[in-house]
Amino acid sequence: MPRRSREAMLRGIDGNRIIAGAYSDSRSGGICPMLAAHRNGGRTDLSSFARCWDFFTGARRPRLATRREIGTLRAYLEMSLIDTPTSEPISVVADRLRAERAAIRAENSEAIRRLAEAPLDSEPSAEDTSADSGRDRVPTGERDRTSELRHRRMWSWIRPTRSYDEYRERIAAAAEQLSEQRAGELLIETEAAEPAAH
């Protein structure tokens, strides 16, 4: 709907009884929002709005619109009239965003390819973890916290794998290690609690 029609509709719904289900209703003296816009200088032929309005209100015959329905229509009209910081059509903005994303993907694709082709070491050395082992890393926006967290138990993520079987084995080993640690902690807690009970 043209801007002038939306502005006229806002004026029209404030100054008229608004109905749903018909263009006008002689019994209640109400008119539909489109006729209200026409009478306030926003002449436009947009039958799709009338169908959408009747679908939204669920009206099968002429009736007065509820306060909620009119409030919702007013809110949508007011939101649509807010000036955006750019006067470009949305299709131009969408094309620019797609181009920017493609450029970011192109920048990172070489680093991702090298990372995927690099052999996985069985166990990284301290020099490798601190110096990034000389290979390109995919930018994640996170800082390296290796030195800060090195001595904290269970801080690191599981290393990447090339196959599902290898991943499944690592998860199983990690789960087994975690259950052993929990069992050890429970045993220590139980032993510490026993002398207090006696």
Image (cartoon, rainbow, N blue to C red):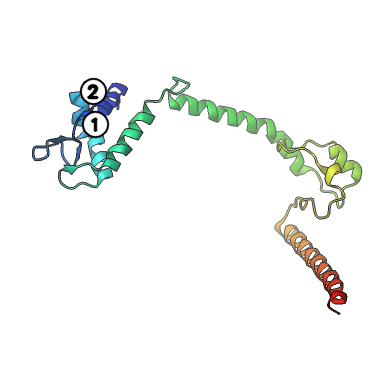
Q: Does residue 92 show up?
A: yes
Identify the residue at horizontal 76%, vertical 41% (top origin): 115
Give the x, y percent position of residue 84: 45, 23
Kind of residue sitting beneath label 1: Ile
Locate residue 28 relative to residue 140 in the image: left or right: left
Q: Quadrant of residue 35?
A: top left
Locate residue 25 relative to residue 107 in the image: left or right: left
Locate residue 132 relative to residue 112 in the image: left or right: right
| Outermost residue, bottom side | 198
Give the x, y percent position of residue 47: 22, 34
Of labels 2 and 1, the one closer to you: 1
- Using the image, tell me which numbered label, if any, was put on residue 13: 1
Judge by depth and name the residue closer to the eye, 80 or 109.
80
- Using the image, tell me which numbered label, if any, was put on residue 42: 2
Judge by depth and name the residue closer to the eye, 22 or 195.
195
Identify the residue at horizontal 83%, vertical 77% (top origin): 197
Give the x, y percent position of residue 31: 16, 34
Residue 191, relative to residue 166: is it above or below? below
